[in-house]
Image (cartoon, rainbow, N blue to C red):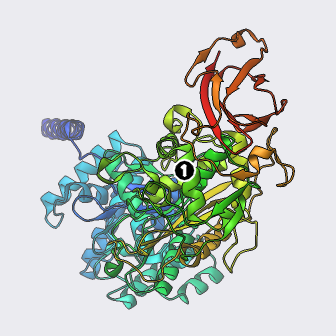
Amino acid sequence: MTATHTRILLLAALLALGTATGLFLGWRWFEALIETAQPPSLGVPTSVLVLDRNGRLLRPFSVADGRWRLPVTLADLDPTYLAMLLAWEDRRFHGHAGVDPLALARAGAQLLTRGRIVSGGSTLTMQLARLLDGRSTRDPGGKLHQALTALALERRHSKDAILGAYLTLAPYGGNLEGVRAASLAWLGKEPRRLTPAEAALLVALPQAPEARRPDRDPQAARRARDRVLERALALGIIDQQAAQAARATPVPSARRPFPLLAPHLAQRARRAQPQAGEIHLTLDAALQSRLEALATERAAALGPAVSVALLAADHGSGQVLASVGSAGLFDADRDGFIDMTRALRSPGSTLKPLIYGLAFEAGLAHPESLIEDRPTGFGGYVPANFDRGFQGTVTVRRALQLSLNVPAVKLLEAVGPARLVARLRRAGAAPVLPDSAPPGLAVGLGGVGISLQDLVQVYAALARGGAPVALTETLGPGEPPPGGGARVLEGRAAWTLASVLAGTPPPANAAPGSLAFKTGTSYGYRDAWAIGFDGRHVAGVWVGRPDGAPVPGLAGIEAAAPILVDLFARLGPIAPLSPPPPGVLLATHAQLPPPLRHVEGRSSAGTAQAGGPEIAYPPDGARIDLGLGEGQLVDLVLKVRNGTPPFAWFANGAPIGQEPFARTARFTPDGPGFVTLSVVDGRGGAARASVFLE
């Protein structure tokens, strides 16, 4: 070998070494560049979702800039759609590191040979990088930055996280981002189950979201969809029959509205949980949809400006299953934006059942007792019936079922208006008295402000045998019972009341005895109500004008009760009411003790009628130690003074069997706790005392 050859070889070796060193150093520099790059976060803001008890979407809210960007996971997507997406956009997605050299080489060769872009070389990761930072990729510098960002993203996140982020951000026309928003807007469904035609359309739209918008150019959308179908067929993702059927499927030509169920409650729940991404309500989306349709339909039939509000709950758990605040959120003529489930209105006669329940509890009346419905004054207050007539002597059962006013006021005077209001509060209601005045007899006929929500909660307690329950609207730990858990009514009195309400004459569209319910009409025909329950559900209906204007002829039995019946029909089969608890006095009028056969005397709670009986022992409000905490069963001696024999004694509304002409009696309590003792004499005079036994 000559010296010249040696010099040439040495020079070549030096050049090769320099090139390798340069490549190595360049590679290390590029690696360091990727490692130190700070790619955008994948945690982009997404729409707040309000979901029902089963996870179904009730209402999404747009993000701050007005875009619809719903969160989505790969498990939420149809597998065929995912296969089509990767086949069309990035076949080697799971194999490359963010940039696909083969795809870039193919795109470059096509550009050189055909003079135009036939297919892009960007991977899904590169597209995500562009969506995240919004930088233009039309110039080489922008494209290089996109590639670098894609490589950095792949080193910091899993493939599933990258694909999920792309599917959340991909543009679909207008203010739609992400496949879930697109599926709801263009297809009217969640992307969990898609036909091949639907899947192909959702794959095609992000490449040219404005040019291919189905509502602007359905033919362009169709052509793009069919090209995706051809690729899917060629790769065996779908067969020939499926491809042919998909190509024959029309492309949607209009955008659909997003779900907007329970809008008032959803908005209220969002305000209560401003940081939550998902809010889970107790509602049932299917039932909510049916009841919203019912409210809209019935309001339209009732006339202009009239609205309807509905509320349905499971009284066992207290969970609200449907809440309809108006007959239409956007119906300006009916003030649809006002949530009438929470508005304070006059309840009409819907509080009467609790008055009767308190009378049953105190032993002042029985459903078969007789009571007078005649013109009567109560210290200047002279109530009249709805029809301005009077029924004369009727049973207490009939008086409640006919919603007679004089008997109700007579019993309210006996049990005391303050006690009625206190029991409403025990149920969790918040009644508002006019000018914060003390409760008077007018409370029993609607002279108080109360909401539909509160009325349903009161009736839920009646349906549960007098035990209060808090109505809840969001899933999670239940609210504690209202009123500290104190009973709204004693169990026997509550059952007796329910049996009376179940016999209320039903509207024309219902069978007798199917529901325990009560209607009400407020003064001036401003509000019509129907509240009722069966063995499982409790529900309420309000009808009227949100602005409080009168609606001539509006009455609870005609306007609200038929809606209540249809509401329960949509809830499912009627569940039977519970059987009577032990100790209920089931008797005809003739079988009643003489003091219970006729309700005549007036007495306030805890006092005796002038000249009537008085409980000499135990005194009202006493605490008596009988050693009950030690498991002993000890009799409590009861004494009465004044009054005319025979005497009938009651403990929590249940009769105590004793010698009727004796002035002493014995009561054996079941255990420690509060007990209400009542005595009624032969002339109908009564007295009551509440004591605590321990």
**Rendered image quadrant of residue 617:** top right
Q: What residue is at 76 percent from the left and 35 percent from the top?
A: 647
**Rendered image quadrant of residue 681:** top right
Where disc 1 sits, the SS reads helix
Q: Report the quarter where the C terminus lies.
A: top right
Q: Which residue does the numbered mark 1 point to in the structure image?
A: 412
Placement of 532 over or under 559, stated as above or below? above
Q: In the rendered view, does 488 fall on the left or right side of 397?
A: left
**Residue 467, can we see it?**
yes
Residue nearest the observer in this picture, 599 or 45 = 599
Q: What residue is at 46 percent from the left and 42 percent from the top?
A: 418
Identify residue type, mark 1. Answer: Leu
- List x then y, in percent, for residue 33: 19, 40
Q: Report the quarter where the N terminus lies.
A: top left
Residue nearest the observer in this picture, 629 or 230 = 629
- List x then y, in percent, for residue 3: 13, 35
Q: What residue is at 32 percent from the left and 60 percent from the top?
A: 169
Residue nearest the observer in this picture, 346 or 121 = 346
**Residue 119, can we see it?**
no
